[in-house]
Image: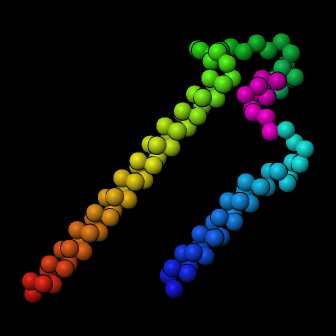
Amino acid sequence: MKEKSRTRQNVILLILVLALVIAPFIVAKNGAFGGSDDQGTAQIKKFDPGYKPWAHPLWTPPSGEIESLLFTVQGSIGTGIMAYIIGNAHGKRTAKKQLNDSDATSSTNNK
């Protein structure tokens, strides 16, 4: 029975994820999915044409491909860190449970 509820839960979660992925394409059928990098500056210049940015990037990548590569590497490193933390916590919990189970088994055998 527990396995059935877990399968049902997984199916529901999968449907929700698919709905979240597909929804933007349905809502904005002909919309352009652009980034927000320059939209803030464009809006400021629209309201204040004399605006001059006071902060500038320390380094600008030589091309858009390099920028995409660095963004992907950054995301991969973050994902790796999160996976390590989750895996480490899972391993600790499993080891603690096994230790408690073995202690309970040995204490019942000694009685």
In magenta, the rendered stretch is: 33-42
Q: Position of residue 92 (x, y in %)?
A: 31, 58
Magenta residues, dominant SS class: loop
Q: Which of the colour schemes (rainbow, by chain, secondary structure, one colour) is used?
A: rainbow
Whether 71 is among the magenta residues is no
* Residue projecting furthest to the right: 30
**Measuring 20% from the left and 78% from the top, which residue is drawn there?**
104
For the point 18% across and 74% down, the residue is 103
Q: Nearer the viewer, residue 62 or 105?
A: 62
- In which quadrant will I find the C terminus? bottom left
| Residue 97, x across and y down, in percent | 29, 69
Give the percent coordinates (x, y) of residue 7.
57, 75
Is residue 31 shown above or below 98? above
- Residue nearer the viewer, 79 or 47: 79
- 105 vs 68: above or below: below
Image spot of residue 101 (x, y percent): 24, 74
